[in-house]
Amino acid sequence: MSNPEPGLNRSRRWHRPAIIGLVVALLLAVIAMLIFAPLGSGDDDAEVEILAPGTDAPDPVPAPSETATGTAPAGTAASE
């Protein structure tokens, strides 16, 4: 695309705020990278212990076959 206006000085003046904004944004991004990049680095030499899920925990709900058979809870119609 070509510039529809022949005045280059006028075009430079109109685009100056946008160019300054881009430069400021790039500078802020570089500063943020320099500040926050060291925070993400961890100790890579530390050994990580991977544990299998435990099987020694009690079941939260007992299976129906493990409950007492033939008795109903007190206060129900079957226990009267």
Image (cartoon, rainbow, N blue to C red):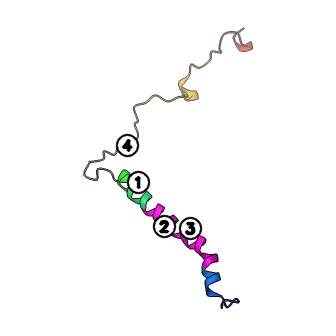
Which quadrant of the figure has residue 63? Answer: top right
Mark 3, other Cα within 10 Å: few <14 / some 14–19 / many ≥20: few
Element assignment for label 1: helix
Element assignment for label 4: loop
Q: Mark 1 points at which residue?
A: 36
Give the spatial CA distance, label 1 vs label 4. Answer: 34 Å
Element assignment for label 3: helix
Which stretch did the figure color magenta? 13-30
State which tag comes first along the sequence, 2 or 1: 2
In magenta segment, residue 22: yes
Q: Mark 3 points at which residue?
A: 21
**Residue located 42% across and 59% down the image:** 31
The C terminus - image quarter: top right
State which tag comes first along the sequence, 3 or 1: 3
Which quadrant of the figure has residue 22? Answer: bottom right
Mark 1 or 4: the one toward you? 1
The N terminus - image quarter: bottom right
Which of 7/30 is in front?
7
Q: Residue furthest right?
A: 77
**Residue located 53% across and 25% down the image:** 66
Main SS, magenta region, reads helix
Relative placement, left or right, of 44 versus 36 is left
Relative placement, left or right, of 60 versus 7 is left
Q: Report the amino acid beneath label 2.
A: Leu
Disc 3 to disc 2: CB gap under 8 Å: no
Q: Where is residue 37 in the image (x, y as percent from the top left)?
A: 38, 56
Element assignment for label 2: helix
Q: Name the residue under label 2.
A: 26
Mark 2 or 1: the one toward you? 2
Mark 1, other Cα within 10 Å: few <14 / some 14–19 / many ≥20: few
Give the spatial CA distance, label 3 vs label 2. Answer: 9 Å
State which tag comes first along the sequence, 3 or 2: 3
